[in-house]
Amino acid sequence: MYPASFGYSAPATLDEVLSTLSKLGDEGRVLAGGQSLIPLMKLRQAAPAHLVDINGVGGLDQISDSNGHLEIGALVRHADVITSEPVSRSVSTMASAAPWVADPLVRNRGTVVGSVAHCDPKGDWASVMLALDAQVVAKSMAGERTIAMTDFIVDFFTNSLEPGEMATALKVPKDVPNSGGTYLKLERKIGDYATVGVAAFLALDSAGKIARAGLGLTSVASLNVKATEAEAMLTGNEPSDELFAEAAESAARASSPSSDVRGPADYKRELVRVYTRRALTGAWAKARGEV
Amino acid sequence: MLISVNVNGAEQQREVEPRKLLVDFIRSELGMTGTHIGCDTTSCGACTVLLDGKPVKSCTLLAVQANGRNVRTVEGLKQNGQLHPIQTAFKENHGLQCGFCTPGMMLVGSALLAENPDPSDDDVRWAISGNICRCTGYMNIVKAIQSAGQAMQGA
C-alpha cells in the first residue's frame, strides 16, 4: 500500500521546522515516529500535502527534569521511556504504562508526544497525561504556549494546535511524596489497541486522605476521557475499597464505549468499572510505598 | 529526492519519491527480497530491518527517512561467507517452518543478543512479541535465539 503523494522536508533545526510549518499552514504535518500517521496515510485515511520530518532535529529526544516536571521531548520514543531512569524514579504512572504501548519494534520508533498529538482515543499515553494533568508545550514562529491536556484534545483525531504550530514537548508533573500511579490495559494480544485502559494517580496528604486524584480512560469514547466526577468524589476523602468502588461506578458512567471486535459496549463499561477499582487500589499501594 | 542509505555496509544512492516505503526501496530498488511484506499494516514484523541497530518495521518507515543512516537486512547477517550464529541456530533448532517470518525473527534475535547475550525465555518472548509466526508456535524460535547466544559467547 502506498500513501498519496506528498511533499517532504527534513529540516535540521527547530527554527527551520517552525518556519517551514508556518509557510505551509494547513498543508503541513509533522512526521515524528510515524507509527500512527504512516499507516493512516497508507490506508488513505490521511493525506497531508506536506510532511515535515523532525527526526533530524537535535535536542528533541531528551527527557529533562525541571521544577517538579519531566519534560518529554517530541522525539522521545516509547522505548526510551521504558529505560529512562528519571521516569522510573519520578513518574510512576508513565513507567507503568510504557511497556503496554504497542510492540517492541513500534516502541523503537513511535514517540510519546506524537501519540498524544494524534488524538486517537485508543492511544494509551493521552489517558496517562489526562490523569496526571500534564501540559503540551506548543511552539510556532509566534512564540511558545503551554496547553492543558483537557484543552489539547478536542475530538477524535483532532488537537487544538493552530496551523504552523508544533507540539515540542510534554510537561509531566513528577510524583510528589506519598503519591503513585498505575496504568492497566486489557489487550487481545501484544500490539493491539486497548479493549479498555485505565490510568489512575493518587496523592495522599499527611493524614492519609486523598489530596489529588487523576483518572484517564482509553478506548471508551470518541476521545480519551478524564473521569472528572470520579476524581472529585475521591479528592479530600479517606481511601477505602468502598470509595474506590463508588469512583469506579462513576468512571464507568463517564465512558461511552461502542461495540466492536473487541467486545460489546456493556462488557467494556463493566471493564472500566473493574479496572478503575483495581488501578486505584494499585495507585494507593504505591502512594503508601507498599509497592 | 536523492537519498543515500548504507545497506549492509554498502552505500546505495537512489532517486526516490517521498512516499516510497523503506521495504519497497529494499525489495524493488535494491532487489533484496529477504525483507518480506506480510500484513503491510505494522502488525506482523515480517518486514523487520535494523535501523542503526534497532529493529523497526520497514513497511512503516519512508525510504527518505533512512537517508544517511544504516540499514541491516537479513542479507547482511552473513559475514565473509559464514552464516551468522543466529542463522546457524535457526537451522539447527528447526526455528522455522515456512520461513516467512524468519528474516524478521533473526534480526530481532540478533539485536536482542547484542544487548543481552544470555536472554531468558521471557526476555526472548518479550523481544519477539512484535513479530508473528503462524507455523512454529514459537518454541523453537525461542530455543534458536538462546542457542545462538550460547554459541556467540563460546566463540
Image (cartoon, coloured by chain):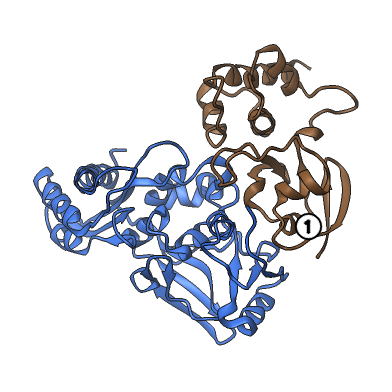
Chain colours: A blue, B brown
Picture quadrant of residue A10: bottom right
Residue drawn 77% across the image and 37% down it: B33
Residue A286, horizontal then vertical, whole percent = 29, 44
On screen, residue A244 versus residue A22, left or right, reads left
Q: Quadrant of residue A120?
A: bottom left
Subunit ID for the residue under disc 1: B
Say above or below: A225 vs A290. below
Q: Is residue A208 visible?
A: no
- Characterize the local packing of mark 1: few (<14), some (14-19) or many (20 or more) Cα atoms within 10 angstroms: some
Residue A255 location (% of width, % of height) = 23, 57
Q: Which residue is mark 1?
A: B67
In the current view of this chain or complex, which residue is farthest to the bottom?
A142
- Camera-nearest residue between A290 and B54: B54
**Apparent side of residue A121 relative to residue B149 in the rendered image (left or right):** left
Image position of A238 (left or right of B147):
left
Quadrant of the rendering where the C terminus of chain A is positioned: top left
Location of residue A285 in the rendering, given as x and y in whole percent from the top left corner: 25, 42
Give the residue drawn at x 28%, y 42%.
A263
Kindly identify the residue that appears in the image at 56 percent across and 38 percent down.
B44
Disc 1, SS: loop
Q: How many marks?
A: 1
Residue at image position (49%, 81%) is A162
- Give the vertical position of A192 relative to B13 (above or below): above
Is A266 displayed left or right of B40 in the figure?
A: left
Percent across and percent down for residue B89 are 70, 17
Amino acid at circle 1: Asn
Q: Residue furthest left?
A: A242
